Image: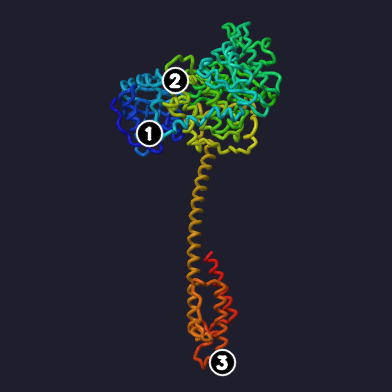
Amino acid sequence: MARLKNLTERQDNSDWCGKRKNYTGAERDCGLDSLLELHKKSFILCFACNVENVRLLDRVSSKKASIGSLYLTATHLIFVEHLSDSRKETWILHSQICAVEKQGTTATGCPLLIRCKNFQVIQFIISQERDCHDIYISLIRLSHPVKYEELYCFSFNPKQEGNEREQGWNLTDLKAEYNRMGVPNNLWQVSHANRDYGVCDTYPAELYVPKSVSTPLIVGSSKFRSRGRFPVLCYFRQDNNAAICRSSQPLSGFSARCLEDEQMLQAIRKSNPGSDFLYVVDTRPKLNAMANRAAGKGYENEDNYSNIKFHFIGIENIHVMRNSLQKLLDVCELRSPSMSDFLWGLENSGWLKHIKAIMDAGIFIAKAVAEEAASVLVHCSDGWDRTAQVCSIAGLLLDPFYRTLKGFMVLIEKDWVSFGHKFNHRYCHLDGDPREVSPVIDQFFDCVWQLMEQFPCAFEFNERFLVHIHHHVYSCQFGNFICNNNKESKELRIQEKTHSLWPHLWKNGIDYKNPLYRQDHSQTQGVLRPHTAPSNFRFWRSMYNGFEKGMHPRQSVTEFLMAVKEETQQLEDELEILEEKLARLDQSNLRNRKGEIKQLHKLEISTFDQCLANTPQDYTDNGKPFTSCSPSQADEDSETTILTHGMKHSDTDLSGNSDQESGVADLNCRSPNGGDFLSSEDNNKNLSVYSEELAFAVA
């Protein structure tokens, strides 16, 4: 393999992660040259390499394979087509690679199959088996880092200025979010018992608990809960004081009990004066919960906890979900499947059945809070997978704020990041136990999309927003979804060394706006009540077949509406600019018109004065000199005075002499230019018009 050649800047029609213009990853701004500088500093590879005459196959259609160059860098695998008019590029982050398969050599070359965590599948044909083997070995190593510092987010630099990094992390302020919900108040308080993560190392430092709960009670309850995850507040509804709390399963076994834990649940119930009971929702199948009893865990005994109503939901564990997704992806990778094969595979995967179970749990909690005004405690086994799913779905159903761009970011930070969802383990950021991997947040995004399909006007964001967040959960480009909990993030100084995803999405918010969203729409306000009949759940092709362009239309209705809206906005901006130019031209013309009127009036006054200067009265007025009006004094009163004065003297002279005797033309009969002069009445009218024009010009 040869050393990597410098490439020219990417063209506008280039691809990133295989999808033309759909992904706006910030790393595209740095260019290949900047990446090369990054690679020189990388401890993973001290060089970057390329392979020529590589073919990229279209796995869906029979379209001819694209021929180009394959570049391997410290962070990306890049394929650049050779066509001079397009030079389309396909960028694949190493952190996105799930599996690499080197297939048997054929007459055309050595096939290399790459499966990505964002459900992209790419197949290259490399002419030389040696080159294929080198690429294969390199990708295996680069896609399975062993230390956090090897992840892309620690070297990614979007070239932000000053304190933009800190401001980006503060965009989702969870303290402000709890204040928006109305806590702390006379029912709930903030507790600093976990300030140093000493009570529970997977919880945030600041937690909200009932007002009556003391620190010893918190410590006692945590010792009776798996992983120390005692019941805490995650959502408060101000209009009826109902709350959603979360925890892990109790260490009850078959008969164990804990007085502090029982008092904790009673305190949660009493924090809602409008209800005399508390729902306890176990999201696991009952059989699974009972099996955990044999390991000393289990669920709450209603005989020990007074005034609770226990409810099982039946969401399967992470292992079942992982297998279900794999079966779904196997169906998606079928080439030209028949309708029966596709539907059978979809049903056999059980994926939509699991999505419905998660949705049912969220709906149950939302109804309990909104309609029964009852508080709910939610848990699964450890309280960081199924609990996060159903609590966040319930929040979306209850609160319109979480259905906005900003609110959805806050929701993920609150219910997933801060409460210790294990991003590293679940999404295989570092090389680890494959049995820990599971598509937990993938299912959450699928549930949100199902809601968006039923309520197209209720969400401010569009499908693209969900797809991009999902992409960056796996990309490791930003620091939001790297660690398993807040304690790890603090120890790694994530906010100091990496950048947040949210300001990047917020800056490009216009790309993620739903054109059907209206703040005053009935769907936008209040609680959503979705239908859960099986016919209401659909296969999300833009997620699972998003890279297979032959599998679905090139443009959805929503994308078409967004394009129309963008075009309309551009036209409105152009109209505003033209209106501003027109206003400036009108002002300029008005100033010119005023100047012309002033000049015209000066000319008329000057001509009139010259006419008066040709009469004897201009030189003698009963032995007194006559003073004419200057242009600067030419207001309406002065014009009237001049006219009256002149006409008075004219009448006196004419009474004694005829115009033949004096040799001077009659002023009442001649114009200043030598023509017939207007009558006194017409003359007064003309002067009045001049006065009005003068007043307008001065104004």
Query: What SS does tag 1 mark?
Result: helix
Q: Amino acid at mark 1?
A: Cys
Locate the N terminus by quadrant.
Answer: top left
Give the labeled residue for mark 3: 656
SS type, badge 3: helix
Q: Earlier in the sequence, mark 2 or mark 3?
A: 2
State the residue lying farthest toward the left.
2
Q: Is residue 442 left or right of residue 51?
A: right
- Residue 202: image location, x then y, percent: 51, 17
Contact flag, marks 1 and 2 (Cβ < 8 Å): no
Q: Quadrant of the C terminus?
A: bottom right
Say what amino acid the circle numbered 3 marks.
Answer: Gly
> Mark 1 or mark 2, which has the lower sequence index?
1
Kind of residue sitting beneath label 2: Glu
Q: Could you tell me if residue 4 is visible in this image?
A: yes
Give how far apart the Cα atoms at labels 1 and 2 are. 29 Å
Closer to the chain start, of discs 1 and 3, is 1
Q: Can you give x and y, in whole percent of width and height, for residue 160 in the image? A: 41, 34
> Which tag is nearer the camera, tag 2 or tag 3?
3
**Label 2, on which residue?**
491
Residue 670 is situated, as x and y percent measured from the top left of the image, at: 53, 84
Q: Secondary structure at mark 2?
A: helix
Front residue of 406/174: it is 174
Q: Quick one: 134 or 188, which is closer to the camera?
A: 188
Q: Callout 1: 10 Å neighbours few (<14), some, many (20+)?
A: some
What colouring method underlies this structural image? rainbow
Residue that carries the numbered disc 1 in the rendered image: 30
Cα distance between the residues tagged 2 and 3: 117 Å
Do we see residue 327 in this rendering? no
- Farthest residue to the bottom: give it: 661
